[in-house]
Image (cartoon, rainbow, N blue to C red):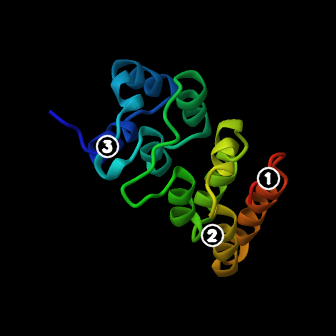
């Protein structure tokens, strides 16, 4: 049977520790390269789960080679999705800032043409501490070595 992104998120949310998470991924390695409902990838599902951690993100991307390049049916990349999801909440904006530290995500930034202008628009409407975090994201983007914006 096919699992929806809601089913996968529920399973991810049931992992209490990083070790539980690793065991779940090892037991379901087919999730790494699979697209789920709405063309969400496992990484995208993790980013919105209640039990997200940067350690889990790093395990998926660095140790397991999870797909971060999947484009959704709405033609959104992981970064587009994160920007829509995070601009109103500081904790979510901090997740975006955290994942932007990874070289793999920075490579994706360079191939997401509207990200900088979209980020600037979100900064304008964000409030207080969220704006501060998004400004840190902006600094990362403009300081990337191979700018194509």
Residue 58 x %, y %: 60, 32
Q: Are marks 2 and 3 in contact (CB under 8 Å)?
A: no
Look at the picture and state if 33 lies above or below 5. Answer: above
Residue 93 x %, y %: 63, 60
| Mark pair 2, 3: CA separation | 25 Å
- Of residues 47 and 65, the one drawn nearer to the viewer in this rendering: 65
Q: Residue at x 52, y 23 (%)?
A: 64
Q: Are marks 1 and 2 in contact (CB under 8 Å)?
A: no
Number of marks in picture: 3
Labels 1, 2: front one: 1
Residue 135 x %, y %: 77, 66
Residue labelled with disc 3: 36
Which of the two discs, 3 and 1, labels the residue nearer the N terminus? 3
Residue labelled with disc 1: 147
Which of the two discs, 1 and 2, labels the residue nearer the N terminus? 2
| Mark pair 1, 2: CA separation | 16 Å
Q: Quadrant of the N terminus?
A: top left
């Amino acid at each position: 049977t096919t699992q929806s992104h809601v089913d996968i998120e529920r399973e991810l949310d049931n992992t209490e520790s990083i070790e539980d998470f690793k065991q779940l991924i090892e037991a379901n390695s087919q999730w790494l390269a699979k697209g789920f409902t709405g063309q969400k990838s496992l990484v995208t599902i993790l980013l919105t789960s209640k039990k997200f951690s940067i350690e889990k993100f790093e395990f998926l991307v660095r140790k397991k080679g999870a797909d971060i390049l999947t484009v959704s049916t709405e033609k959104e990349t992981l970064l587009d999705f994160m920007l829509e999801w995070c601009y109103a909440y500081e904790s979510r904006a901090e997740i975006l800032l955290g994942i932007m530290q990874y070289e793999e995500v920075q490579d994706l930034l360079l191939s997401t043409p509207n990200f900088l202008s979209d980020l600037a628009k979100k900064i304008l409407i964000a409030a207080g501490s969220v704006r501060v975090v998004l400004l840190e994201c902006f600094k990362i983007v403009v300081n990337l070595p191979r700018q194509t914006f």
